[in-house]
Image (cartoon, rainbow, N blue to C red):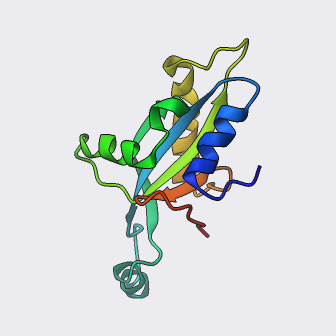
Amino acid sequence: MNIESYQDLIQAAQAQTEPQRLLFVFAKAELPNGYTEHQKQHFEQGQGGALEPVLCVDKLPQDVANFQQLVEESRHTGLNWDIAFVSALGGRGGFPPNSDEAVQPLQMMMQKIQGGMIADFLTFDKNGELVALY
Protein backbone atom coordinates (compact mmCIF):
# COMPACT_ATOMS: atom_id res chain seq x y z
CA MET A 1 0.00 0.00 0.00
CA ASN A 2 1.25 3.43 -0.90
CA ILE A 3 0.85 5.73 2.11
CA GLU A 4 0.02 9.27 1.05
CA SER A 5 -1.81 10.52 4.15
CA TYR A 6 -2.28 9.90 7.83
CA GLN A 7 -5.54 8.08 7.07
CA ASP A 8 -3.62 5.77 4.72
CA LEU A 9 -1.25 4.99 7.60
CA ILE A 10 -4.12 4.11 9.93
CA GLN A 11 -5.78 1.95 7.27
CA ALA A 12 -2.50 0.17 6.52
CA ALA A 13 -1.90 -0.50 10.22
CA GLN A 14 -5.40 -1.89 10.65
CA ALA A 15 -5.06 -4.08 7.54
CA GLN A 16 -1.98 -5.96 8.81
CA THR A 17 -2.34 -9.63 9.69
CA GLU A 18 -1.08 -8.92 13.22
CA PRO A 19 -2.31 -5.95 15.31
CA GLN A 20 0.04 -2.98 15.30
CA ARG A 21 1.22 -0.40 17.81
CA LEU A 22 2.17 2.94 16.29
CA LEU A 23 5.31 4.65 17.53
CA PHE A 24 5.51 8.44 17.42
CA VAL A 25 8.54 10.64 18.03
CA PHE A 26 7.86 14.37 17.97
CA ALA A 27 10.76 16.62 17.05
CA LYS A 28 11.39 20.35 17.13
CA ALA A 29 13.36 22.15 14.45
CA GLU A 30 16.39 23.95 15.87
CA LEU A 31 19.52 25.58 14.60
CA PRO A 32 22.37 23.07 14.69
CA ASN A 33 25.35 23.60 16.98
CA GLY A 34 27.96 25.82 15.33
CA TYR A 35 25.49 27.14 12.75
CA THR A 36 26.59 29.62 10.12
CA GLU A 37 24.90 32.92 9.32
CA HIS A 38 23.67 31.35 6.06
CA GLN A 39 22.09 28.46 8.00
CA LYS A 40 20.48 30.94 10.40
CA GLN A 41 18.95 32.91 7.53
CA HIS A 42 17.52 29.73 5.97
CA PHE A 43 16.19 28.58 9.32
CA GLU A 44 14.46 31.92 9.89
CA GLN A 45 12.79 31.44 6.48
CA GLY A 46 11.47 28.05 7.60
CA GLN A 47 14.12 25.96 5.86
CA GLY A 48 16.84 23.70 7.18
CA GLY A 49 17.80 23.22 10.79
CA ALA A 50 18.23 20.12 12.89
CA LEU A 51 15.38 18.04 14.29
CA GLU A 52 15.66 17.29 18.00
CA PRO A 53 13.26 14.76 19.56
CA VAL A 54 11.24 16.27 22.38
CA LEU A 55 8.52 13.69 23.04
CA CYS A 56 7.67 10.10 22.20
CA VAL A 57 4.56 7.99 22.62
CA ASP A 58 3.10 4.70 21.48
CA LYS A 59 -0.55 4.29 20.52
CA LEU A 60 -2.89 1.72 19.07
CA PRO A 61 -4.20 2.81 15.64
CA GLN A 62 -7.79 3.00 16.90
CA ASP A 63 -6.70 5.40 19.66
CA VAL A 64 -5.33 7.92 17.16
CA ALA A 65 -7.53 7.37 14.12
CA ASN A 66 -7.58 11.14 13.62
CA PHE A 67 -4.29 13.06 13.55
CA GLN A 68 -5.89 16.02 15.33
CA GLN A 69 -6.49 13.76 18.36
CA LEU A 70 -2.76 13.23 18.54
CA VAL A 71 -2.00 16.93 18.15
CA GLU A 72 -4.49 17.86 20.85
CA GLU A 73 -3.07 15.28 23.23
CA SER A 74 0.46 16.56 22.60
CA ARG A 75 -0.62 20.10 23.52
CA HIS A 76 -1.26 18.94 27.08
CA THR A 77 2.45 18.18 27.48
CA GLY A 78 3.40 21.82 26.99
CA LEU A 79 6.14 20.79 24.56
CA ASN A 80 6.32 22.33 21.10
CA TRP A 81 7.13 20.18 18.09
CA ASP A 82 7.28 20.60 14.33
CA ILE A 83 7.50 17.08 12.88
CA ALA A 84 6.07 13.73 13.97
CA PHE A 85 8.07 10.67 12.97
CA VAL A 86 6.00 7.50 12.81
CA SER A 87 6.81 3.81 12.73
CA ALA A 88 4.89 0.66 13.61
CA LEU A 89 5.55 -2.34 15.76
CA GLY A 90 3.80 -5.57 14.82
CA GLY A 91 2.13 -7.86 17.33
CA ARG A 92 1.98 -11.60 17.45
CA GLY A 93 -0.62 -14.24 18.11
CA GLY A 94 -3.41 -11.79 17.41
CA PHE A 95 -2.33 -9.35 20.12
CA PRO A 96 -0.68 -5.95 19.62
CA PRO A 97 2.58 -5.19 21.42
CA ASN A 98 2.08 -3.52 24.78
CA SER A 99 3.60 -0.19 25.81
CA ASP A 100 6.47 -1.89 27.63
CA GLU A 101 7.49 -3.61 24.38
CA ALA A 102 7.51 -0.22 22.64
CA VAL A 103 10.07 1.41 24.97
CA GLN A 104 13.22 0.10 23.29
CA PRO A 105 11.99 0.68 19.69
CA LEU A 106 11.04 4.24 20.64
CA GLN A 107 14.50 4.82 22.13
CA MET A 108 16.06 3.47 18.94
CA MET A 109 13.86 5.78 16.85
CA MET A 110 15.01 8.77 18.88
CA GLN A 111 18.66 7.79 18.46
CA LYS A 112 18.23 7.36 14.70
CA ILE A 113 16.51 10.75 14.40
CA GLN A 114 19.28 12.43 16.39
CA GLY A 115 21.78 10.79 14.04
CA GLY A 116 19.90 11.97 10.95
CA MET A 117 18.86 8.44 9.93
CA ILE A 118 15.21 9.20 9.18
CA ALA A 119 14.56 7.29 5.95
CA ASP A 120 12.76 4.46 7.77
CA PHE A 121 10.04 6.71 9.17
CA LEU A 122 6.97 8.48 7.88
CA THR A 123 6.99 12.17 8.75
CA PHE A 124 3.99 14.40 9.31
CA ASP A 125 3.67 18.09 10.08
CA LYS A 126 1.24 19.48 12.68
CA ASN A 127 -1.52 19.56 10.07
CA GLY A 128 -1.20 15.83 9.51
CA GLU A 129 0.33 16.33 6.08
CA LEU A 130 2.97 13.89 4.93
CA VAL A 131 6.35 15.67 4.67
CA ALA A 132 9.40 14.65 2.70
CA LEU A 133 12.63 15.50 4.54
CA TYR A 134 16.00 15.62 2.84
Q: Is residue 8 left or right of residue 123?
A: right
Q: Nearer the viewer, residue 132 or 129?
A: 129
Quadrant occupied by the C terminus: bottom right
Residue 37: x and y, percent? 37, 86
Residue at left offset 39%, top offset 49%: 68
Residue lying at the far top of the rendered structure? 93
Counting from the top left corner in percent of width and height, residue 84 is at 47, 52
- Residue 74's place in the image compared with 134, above or below, is above
Q: Which residue shows up at 46% across the image and 37% down it?
A: 64
Identified at 41% across, 82% down, the residue is: 36
The residue depicted at 62 percent of the width and 20 percent of the height is 96
Residue 16 quadrant: top right
x then y, percent, for residue 73: 32, 40
Q: Is residue 62 left or right of residue 43?
A: right
Location of residue 26 in the rendering, given as x and y in whole percent from the top left corner: 43, 49
Q: How many marks?
A: 0
Viewer-closest of 77 and 42? 77
Q: Nearer the viewer, residue 55 or 14?
A: 14
The answer to whether residue 7 is above or below residue 37 is above
